[in-house]
Image (cartoon, rainbow, N blue to C red):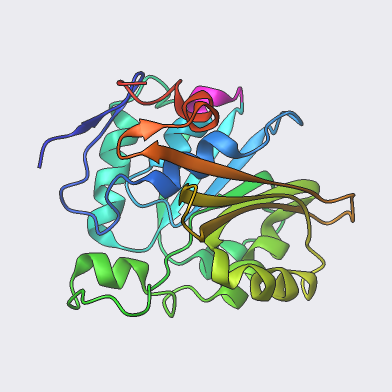
């Protein structure tokens, strides 16, 4: 499989179960960085796509990633090393629960495109399926780790299936994490919502919600979507 080329970096993704996809780019492009995080953690980094966009978009001095799958970890390290920001990027090979047990380790921004298994698919039990099986990183485990690793005034950003939105927000409140920004995503105007982009903090703030439509027709993208991702995709 050939590398996927973005405007300022390339991704090798032949070995990882996490291929380059819309969800990761959306999350990394959408996440609010106006509070200027100094340290960033990418949980379930896959090939490092989100971390690389964070490096392109921010001046964060430390961008750490954690990935449990050995093949994805190796590709993540390679993609970091081949980027212009290799001095700011580091990938841990292991379970996020191990990192969360580290004393005094805190991040200003935690970002995650968590693995989940889409029901009613016919995927066999291969790398892609295993990478997305949400039993490997349950929402409770993810949120517990985030609550331990997030700084007091830090923020947590994620993308999940729209159908899981209310359940995820309810679980997050058990860890004193409150949403302040939600964008619900649909593929095209007549489709139902497919994803929810959500940003949380420990402080309860007024909630801002909106929606994003990706396409007007096949490969005819909306202006809102193009404006969001134009700094990354070569053809936009």
Residue nearest the observer in this picture, 124 or 101: 124
Q: Report if residue 195 lies within the magenta region.
A: no
Residue at the far front in the pictured view? 190
Q: Residue at x 55, y 30 (%)?
A: 224
199 left or right, relative to 43: right
- Residue 190 lies left or right of residue 105; in this view the side is left
Horizontal and vertical percent for residue 211? 63, 46
Q: How many marks?
A: 0
| Residue drawn where x is 71% and y is 63% of the image | 148
Residue 40 point in image, percent of width and height: 60, 41
Q: Give the overall secondary structure of the magenta segment.
A: helix
Residue 88 visible here:
no
Q: Is residue 83 visible?
A: yes
Which contiguous range is marked in magenta?
55-59
Left or right of 28: which side holds 166?
A: right
Q: Residue at x 41, y 76 (%)?
A: 136
Where's the N terminus, which quadrant?
top left
* Residue at the image point whose x is 18% and y is 34% from the top: 3
């Amino acid at each position: 499989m050939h590398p996927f080329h973005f405007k300022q970096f390339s991704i090798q993704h032949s070995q990882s179960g996490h291929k380059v996809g819309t969800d990761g780019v959306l999350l990394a492009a959408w996440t609010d960085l106006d509070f200027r995080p100094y340290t960033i953690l990418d949980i379930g980094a896959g090939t490092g796509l989100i971390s690389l966009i964070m490096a392109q978009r921010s001046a964060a001095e430390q961008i750490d990633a954690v990935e449990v799958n050995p093949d994805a970890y190796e590709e993540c390290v390679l993609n970091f090393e081949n980027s212009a920001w290799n001095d700011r990027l580091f990938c841990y090979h292991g379970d996020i629960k191990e990192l969360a047990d580290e004393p005094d380790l805190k991040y200003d921004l935690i970002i995650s495109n968590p693995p989940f298994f889409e029901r009613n698919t016919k995927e066999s039990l291969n790398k892609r399926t295993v990478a997305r099986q949400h039993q490997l990183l349950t929402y409770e485990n993810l949120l517990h780790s985030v609550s331990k690793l997030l700084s007091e005034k830090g923020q947590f950003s994620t993308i999940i299936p729209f159908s899981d939105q209310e359940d995820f927000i309810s679980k997050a409140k058990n860890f004193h994490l409150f949403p302040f920004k939600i964008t619900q995503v649909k593929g095209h105007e007549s489709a139902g919502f497919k994803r929810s982009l959500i940003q949380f903090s420990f402080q309860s703030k007024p909630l801002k919600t909106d929606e994003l439509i990706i396409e007007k027709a096949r490969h005819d993208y909306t202006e809102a979507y193009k404006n969001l991702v134009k700094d990354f995709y070569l053809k936009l």
